[in-house]
Amino acid sequence: MTVKEEMKLKTDIQIAQEAQMLPIREVAERAGIAEEDLEFYGKYKAKLSEEFWDRIKDNPDGKLVLVTAINPTPAGEGKTTTSVGLGQAMQKLNRKAVIALREPSLGPCFGIKGGAAGGGYAQVVPMEDLNLHFTGDFHAITSANNLLAAMLDNHIQQGNALQIDPRQVVWKRCVDMNDRVLRNIVVGLGNKMDGMVREDHFVITVASEIMAILCLADDLADLKQRLGKIIVAYNFAGEPVTADDLQATGAMTALLKDAIKPNLIQTLEHTPALVHGGPFANIAHGCNSVRATKMALKMSDITITEAGFGADLGAEKFMDIKCRKAGLKPDAVVLVATVRALKYNGGVAKADLAEENLDALKKGIVNLEKHIENLQKFGVPVIVTLNSFVTDTDAENAFIRKFCEERGCEFALSEVWEHGGEGGIELAKKVLETLQTKESHFHTLYEDSLSLEEKIETIAKEIYGARGVVYEPAAKKQLARIEELGFGSFPICMAKNQYSLSDDAKKLGRPENFDIHIREVYVSAGAGFVVALTGAVMTMPGLPKVPAANQIDVDENGKITGLF
């Protein structure tokens, strides 16, 4: 049996379970982290202490490399797989590299995704822990979020001294599970002592404002300040009511005091990985935490981080929100695509993607073209990498290589799924060459001084390629109110579906002559951005007809199967 045939029989979870992990203290030691700086969660996971940050904060920053992708398709792209494989390849080239990744959301692991720790021989481990409870960060976010919700409803019940208008409650409950029946609910049913009856809503935990706050906070003091600014409702006079007004801030911060510390784990090849915070890129900005990224930069020569979904969502928010707020300046961007995904964008059915089809590739490559253009608008050098499949042909690869090089991009094939770090050496060399020869002139897409409408229009036209923006009357009113409240200087967090550059998920490739439809706008005052909801984007996903949970099981020895 060949290696390839043997690999075909192994799932991601089998590869992960067969891996020989090092105790996390040994991985830490290799990265220059002393044992006293670790807060252990078992043998293979640890949080990094505040004292460790104090020790390294004056170190010079390494280079910052962002990994992003084209719009996701059912064919798969492999953004996290590429991030992990690139980190492993840098290690093989004797570069001191640290990976800064996002934590997977529990809900999608039981829904469509089935897991999010990379794949094949480019994974972070322990894979099962990461895809399940990990170190409890998301549980802490859920608890803090729902404590605030409970205190809000209790305040209304106990006399409502703040004169909160129950019709203008904007704070939603959350749970880290795909559960569509919780999108719109009624609370307070029963007798008088069971609370005031009102309509309420749930979002998935990772789309909550607290998720975004945790990711953007510099430290515990900044976290506390941000939590206090959260607007939970408006009073009868139309004035905002905050978490500080409810006196909830201290207790929420107490629940999050450990969750704010970055988590250290390892790749299959023992490269250090800081996995902390993250999803959703269409609501909560979808990047690894500022603390983890900054820590990685002080620990390494090269930090490899990722942003959620495609470059139109995650990468744009990484540049316009995270980098703006944290003062980060990326040195290069790796843009991940697959031959299969580009053919899918060119109209090929999923079942036929294994066949060579240069005509479909020519039609579908316009999606990649737009993402290249978008990333170049931020002044950062771009390296395109193809996550290789055995069905890809030389002619298809050559066509894409020529296409990228004609647009001023470096290009490399990646075989990290199959070969781990070894399969990423070509890509790693291209990244190193880019870092040495091409200077980053990073800048954000728009200035703080623009109006909120101008910022929305800039993103819609420049990044999505829209003709214009159409606002629902309610959204217009909300924008005016947000600016009146003094939040006009905030950046925009566009909540759009991830599958298309437009707000219609069915429009693949590079849509033209379309408008972006804004149906709702609200301010995340603690996170420091304004969310604009487009089209039919959901803040609480549902499970598919056959959820991944159907295949997940555990045997009498505690061995998990079915996570992939």
Image: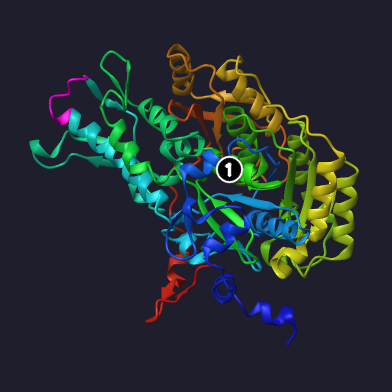
Q: Is residue 490 left or right of residue 418?
A: left
Q: Is residue 393 left or right of residue 496?
A: right
- Which residue is rendered at x = 68% and y = 30% of the image? 466
- In the rendered view of the protein, which quadrant contains the C terminus? bottom right
Residue 495 rendering spot, x and y as whole percentages = 53, 36
**Visual colour scheme:** rainbow
Label 1 amino acid?
A: Met
Magenta extent: 156-162
Residue 468 rendering spot, x and y as whole percentages = 65, 25
- In the rendered view of the protein, which quadrant contains the N terminus? bottom right
Residue 463 picture quarter = top right
Numbered disc 1: secondary structure: helix
Residue 482 picture quarter = top left
Q: Does 480 sit above or below residue 546?
A: above
Mark 1: give few (<14), some (14-19) or many (20+) Cα within 10 Å. many
- Which residue is rendered at x = 43% and y = 15% of the image? 481
Residue 4 rendering spot, x and y as whole percentages = 73, 78
Q: Does 391 sit above or below residue 52?
A: below
- Residue identified by numbered label 1: 295
Q: Is residue 117 left or right of residue 255?
A: right
Q: Does 515 sit above or below residue 302?
A: above
Report if residue 1 is visible in the image.
Answer: yes
Report if residue 184 is visible in the image.
Answer: no
Q: Does 37 sit above or below residue 248?
A: below
Viewer-side residue, 461 vs 309: 309
**Residue situated furthest bottom in the rendering:** 1
Q: What main secondary structure does the magenta stretch of the protein show?
A: loop
Check if residue 36 falls in the magenta segment: no
Residue 476 rendering spot, x and y as whole percentages = 49, 19
Viewer-side residue, 249 vs 54: 54
User: Count of labels shown?
Assistant: 1
- Which residue is rendered at x = 57% and y = 28% of the image? 325
